[in-house]
Image (cartoon, helix red, strand yellow):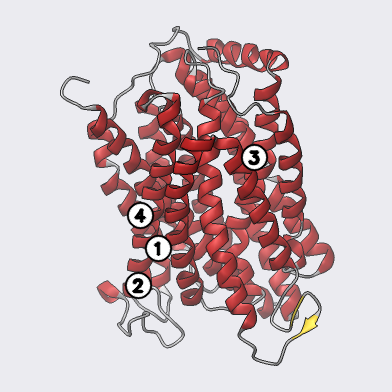
Amino acid sequence: MAGISQRKRIWGWFFFDWASQPYHTLLITFIFGPYFASVAAEYYLGTGLPEAAADARAQALWSTGLTVSGLIIGLGAPIMGAFADTTGRRLPWIIVFSAMYVGGAAAIWGMVPDGSNMWFGLMAFGIGFIGAEYALIFINSQLPSLGSQQEVGAISGSGFAFGYAGGVLSLVLMLLFFVEQPSGKTLIGLDPAFGLDAAAREGTRFVGPFTALWFAVFMVPYFLWVRDTGPAGTGGGIRAALGLLVNTVKGLRHRLSLSAYLGSSMFYRDALNGLYGFGGTYAILVLDWSITSVGIFGIIGAISGALFSWVGGKFDARFGPKPVIIAAIWGLMAVCVTVVGMDRSQIFGIPLAPGSALPDAVFFGCGVLIGGLGGTLQAASRTLMVRHTDPAAPTENFGLYGLSGRATAFLAPALIGLVTTLTGSARIGVAPVIGLFVIGLVLLHWVRPEGDRTP
């Protein structure tokens, strides 16, 4: 650590958010997710299914990919965290999972638009997604070492804001220079850069290699300025890690606030991930948007995410994270009700004139709130976890936090897929997210605002 100032450590830590955010912005929500949905829907239309059934089948397939990835992340997260705490080494694991991120993202290039290898696209996406989420556990565990309990709220919010700014820039670059519109030109009328073939949708598929390269380049400040600063570890291998995990889980019965918080965040973060995972596909399948329109929607959402996260960090520092979390959940529930209650022909049962632009305007407004309140919710949640974290085992505690965020990560996609299949409607299929937010809000009642960690 000699020669590396605390300010540099904080900025190096911020750069992980900047480097990794495009996986969520470009791949999950605004470029690859909608691309996958459009390819799958066209494929199923070609098999003779009617449009509504093809859209529902496409959304169900995307939900399957997110469900399987979520199960793997949820089951492995606490074990990874415990193992890191027993060995006392975190950076080697971050390197391994960074390699998974880069490899999985780059491989997305291979998913061709005729739908013949959709499962390959899902597998590549899943590998990178697992790497991104596992790396995040170790990154989050470093937050307590970056400042005091009063400072980490602002640091967490600023990190998310910086990450969203990176997401905005990466999305703008993709739309301006790579993603082809139906005309074959990009948003500013250019052919896709580097001679990419618009007819083969190579501009859109380039989102995978672009995301991989972005991460590899912008993780350099992190690896230069951040070092392992947690406890040295107790020694031992996987057996010691499992023993530590078992003891921690057993100890939850004596920590009501932490147990309630892990349960609450398990549901409301799953609901938020459901919104992120299906927002772009909703726009494609329900509102018939183009990927370029979804991308513009994403820019608006990401900018609001950066602004809200920064402002939310200030509110967090002043009032504490719990009130910020409650306000964000209520706002996101209102968004979900609005999304489920409209399509191109009506809003809450009120018929609209053919070709009305009102659904588009309303959904753009929803995008502002999804991006803004979602970023605020994630930043404040990370701060509240710090208040419940044992300083002797930060990675293992954040592994449990990762587990709470991913143990039911299959639930939102699975419920969306199930309801979509049963109703034959991609719009109504989003409804289960509301119930997950409600459960998370109820469980927050037992969470102490100041946390319950041992000083």
Report the residue at 46% width, 36% height from top. 317
Q: Quickly name the residue at label 3.
A: 71
Q: Distance between the residues labelled 1 and 2?
A: 8 Å
Which residue is labeled 1 in the image?
207
**Residue at 42% from the left image edge and 11% from the top image edge:** 233
Q: Image height check: is 347 above or below 67? A: below
Mark 4 or 3: the one toward you: 4
Q: Which mark is residue 178?
A: 2
- Marks 4 and 3 sit apart, C-alpha to C-alpha, by 28 Å
Q: Looking at the image, can residue 117 be seen? A: no
Position above or below: 96 against 276: above
User: In 3D space, how far apart are the residues under numbered discs 2 and 4 (Cα atoms)?
Assistant: 17 Å
Quick one: SS at disc 2?
loop
Q: Residue 66 carries which label?
A: none
Do the numbered discs 2 and 4 sit on residues whose CB atoms are within 8 Å? no
Query: Which residue does the image show at 33% across and 74% down from the upper left?
Result: 176
Q: Are marks 4 and 1 in contact (CB under 8 Å)?
A: no
Disc 4 secondary structure class: helix
In the rendered image, which residue does mark 4 sit on?
A: 166
In contact (CB < 8 Å): disc 1 and disc 2: yes
- Based on the displayed image, in which of its 4 quarters is residue 115 positioned? bottom right
Give the amino acid at mark 3.
Answer: Leu
Q: Which residue lies furthest to the bottom in this view?
A: 354
- Name the one closer to the observer, 205 or 428: 428
Amino acid residing under circle 4: Gly
Amino acid found under the numbered disc labelled 2: Phe
Mark 4 crowdedness (10 Å alpha carbons): few <14, some 14-19, many ≥20: many
